Amino acid sequence: MIQTLFGSVPPEPNLLDRLKAGIQKTRTGFVERLEDVIGGKKEIDADLLEELEYTLITADIGVKTATEILESIRQRVDRKLVADAHEIKSLIRQHLLEVLEASERPVPRVLEPPAVVLVVGVNGSGKTTSIGKLASRFKQEGHSVLLCAADTFRAAAIEQLEIWGSRTSTDVIRQQAGSDPSAVLYDALQAAKSRKVDYVIVDTAGRLHTKVNLMAELEKMRRTAVKIIPAAPHEVLLVLDATTGQNGLEQARKFTESSGVTGIILTKLDGTAKGGIVISIARELNLPIRYIGVGEKVEDLLPFDPEQFVASLFE
Amino acid sequence: MFDNLSEKLQRVFKNLRGEGKLTAENMEAALREIRVALLEADVHFRVVKQFIEAVKLQAMGEEVLSALSPTQHVVKIVRDEMIKMLGSHQAKLRFANEPPSAIMIVGLQGSGKTTSTGKLARWLSKNGHQPIMVSVDVYRPAARQQLAVVARDIKLPIYAGTADETKPSELAKSARREAVQTGRDVLLVDTAGRLHIDDQLMTELQELKEQLNPSEILFVADAMTGQDAVKSADEFHKRLGITGVILTKMDGDARGGAALSIRQITGQPLKFVGVGEKFDALEPFHPDRVAQRILGMGDMLSLIEKVEGSIDQKKAEEMQRKLIDNEFTLEDFRDQIKQIRKLGPLESLLGMMPNIGPIKDLKNVKVDENEITRIVAIIDSMTPRERENHMLVNGARRRRIAKGSGTSVQDVNNLLKQYAQARKMMKSLSGMGGMLGKRMGKLKLPGGLGGMFGGM
């Protein structure tokens, strides 16, 4: 079952297939190399552990997490708890799965619409594209959606969102480029209330998490939202590019501090990047991954399922 | 969040004080720390391995220079090696013999191609060229419009295309014609973001290359990229033969280890670094600075250059004279603050400082930009005579100033105290003369800088 802000909907057919198709390229690479490592050698030795380390680190899982996983394996090997190399595979899978599942959170139930979804992230992570896809997804679930063009900073950002709006037949609330994002948000929430829509998805300008004044702007937007809809924003989704390295953890930390991130959209998984940093993020910040982006088409946004994700990595 | 490499090494070598030689034993722990630091900075696993080997070879058995501690010595070896790997000289842009030169801007989605195109156009025009831009991104919604808005903002020409030009090759062709007809010497071609494994779109780029015969193909890479950087850069290089790299988003806190990976895998030089949202935030690449950054040792040179670039030379000289003669008034203090603000947010300035010694604590200082606005407001609320001579400001005047600037008497008191401190400090600094005086003269550092940081 897929959880949404309004309860569960039945899963679409072929979800697993599409997920697999989406991260096919992710699997090649990770799995191939792991199979290389494990298939070829039977004995567990220093070489094997180094190869495993290579596999984990080049997936951007991070030195700390990788070391920790390998350390636990090393201990089991020392205590002769692991007999052969194949067992290592399931041990790693189990470990990654545990980390991801521990950070899973149910989507908060919204009793009284509109549900406000604030979308934040650094420049170029794929916020606007993800919003277009998200709007389409919500609509397919039978909900009404309103988009809010609160990226008033980047050139042609509003126009970009409007094109996604017309692609998904969704209205966009906008103002002039350069106007106060909180003012646009205010308008959008008022409109959403009077039109009684189910979802408002708010596009924000990309910002580096180190820019204190821009992060403060997000706090202001939160305050504005609360004034109109006390429970808003119901979800704050951080859009994270799967190619991001270790800096992703700091991004997640800073955005959580300033805008109260409740979940992650992991984009660009259709490339060769593994997006392993989400493991560190799940571990350190307990943030669930809600969706993954696997292409440029409107339907290329899939709900994240740790089991399927890890399973398809290791199949 | 990252521990500074120097500090880590210091810990490693703590027990080895007095050792005159670097041996296999005392180097091992150090190399482990270097390895972790590089992996945390997103340098690719294999590149790290090569790097460690190179450093090991260099360091082993070497006498520790008498002037340096083992820590400093190893850091020096590491830094020198990294600068060597990053490319030891600054690579210049190449132009065609016959204008217009075409420069193709390529890269993954969201790496910052369009912004970089605008910044590069601006940079070229500041350096005596007449660039014209064209966007051949016919895929992403509003991509061409984005470059049009950028062109308008920086007041440089763009070939906008006609309604029936829907193919990148058509747009590029017309743009070149436009460049020739209007006498522009550089044509910047902003291409659509694409995945390196997207065969169809990569073929499109190869065709564009054939057609344009560009003098440069610049690969735009996000400084936050992780281990995947080698794959995308390698594939773009194999298909297109990139001639250089623009590293973007270096104004964040990513260490930018991808730079080293990309340089190693393609052998092509880094040419520019993007350091901010504004269109003049593009700097030529300096290997030494990026090396320091990857190692977490700050970027003082960029800071100094930024200060030098933004400070009015004449004003600075006048200020220096005033400082020495102790004529530094509140009005000057306000000018100083305003000049520092021109440098951009203080947070980013502090970010460039090395992570060592007393400056380290500054990093955690939350600079309250409002505080600065308040200081300026208070000084604005004074009479010219009060600004000339702060001794005049008695209790009644303080109350008036507080009221006028919307602050409290306490705020006014604080400011006067800060000012008096800054003045005293400047006086003692200028009194030291000799070496420091000379250095201050060379850098033209605004005098108020020290006082202001001290007060916060």
Image (cartoon, grey):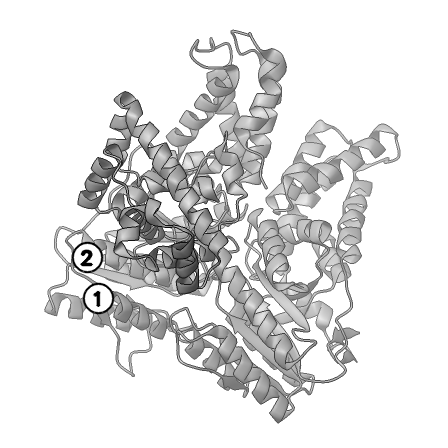
Quote the CA–CA distance across marks 2 and 1. Answer: 8 Å
Helix, strand or loop at mark 2: helix
Pick the residue in front: B371 or B231.
B371
- Residue at figure coordinates x 77%, y 76% from the top left: A109
Give the vertical position of B22 relative to A34 (above or below). above
The numbered mark 2 sits on a residue in which chain?
Answer: B
Task: State yes or no: discs 2 and 1 in contact (Cβ < 8 Å).
Answer: yes
Residue tagged by mark 1?
B156
Give the vertical position of B21 relative to B117 (above or below). above
Residues at discs 2 and 1 both on one chain: yes
- Residue at figure coordinates x 42%, y 69% from the top left: A153
Residue tagged by mark 2?
B125
Residue B154 appearing in the image: yes
Q: Position of residue A134 (x, y in %)?
A: 61, 76
Q: Quadrant of residue B227?
A: top right
Helix, strand or loop at mark 1: loop
